[in-house]
Image: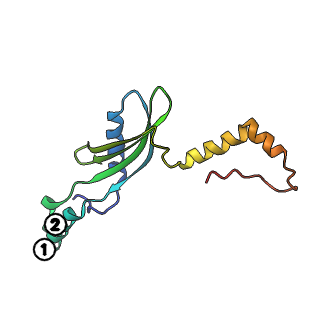
Amino acid sequence: MAPHPFKNLSAEETRVARDTVLSLHKDVLVNFREIFLQEPEKDLMKVFLEAEHAAQPGQSPSSKRPSRLAKVMYDVIGTDRIPEYNESIIDVEQKKRTRHEIVGKDKGQASLTLWEFQDLVEACKKSEEFQKAVAEFQLPEGFELVVEPW
């Protein structure tokens, strides 16, 4: 039996969404930011819920069930090594992309991921400019300088 349209994606559905995106971006690095359930449109859910509530025990409103969709947020990194932020909607049952938007390289930076925070902290600590600025401080013993990416 198919999961309820509002149930979170299963691990398998998440893998299908990931693999579908990867199949569409050959020969480039794809850095996934997030994959999650794209809830069905309200009008589709109204039809499904009406059928679900009217069903007799043992019946299933499967003919009215909205497609299981995953929203996939990711970067495509080509030979120029500059991430290009993308958002795709993947039908996990059909294993195909139904919508796609390239947010682009010139429209701004997508929000940082947790691993990018760590990369930023490490880059700051290795920076000569940062080390010179820190050397100007005379922190009391026991104090630790913390780089806060926020």
Kind of element beneath mark 2: helix
> Total marks drawn?
2
Kind of element beneath mark 1: helix
In this picture, residue 81 sits left or right of residue 144: left
Write down the quadrant of residue 129 in the picture.
Answer: top right
Q: CA distance from mark 2 to mark 1?
A: 11 Å
Residue in the picture at 63% in, 43% down: 120
Crowd rating for badge 1 (residues with CA inside 10 Å; few <14, some 14–19, many 20+): few
Write down the quadrant of residue 88 in the picture.
Answer: top left
Q: Which residue is mark 1?
A: 54
On the image, the x and y values in percent for residue 111 come to 50, 49
Residue in the picture at 36% in, 42% down: 18
Q: Of label 2 and label 1, which has the lower sequence position?
A: 2
Which quadrant of the rendered structure holds the N terminus?
Answer: bottom left
Outermost residue toward the front in this view: 107
In this picture, residue 130 sits left or right of residue 97: right
Comparing 93 with 139, the one in front is 139
Which quadrant of the rendered structure holds the C terminus?
Answer: bottom right
Q: Amino acid at mark 1?
A: Ala
Q: Which residue is mark 2?
A: 47
In this picture, residue 9 sits left or right of residue 42: right
Write down the quadrant of residue 126 in the picture.
Answer: top right
Q: Amino acid at mark 2?
A: Val
Residue in the picture at 32% in, 51% down: 70
On the image, the x and y values in percent for residue 140 come to 87, 56
In this picture, residue 128 sits left or right of residue 69: right
On the image, the x and y values in percent for residue 98 come to 25, 45
Q: Is residue 29 above or below residue 33?
A: above
Q: Is residue 141 above or below residue 25?
A: below
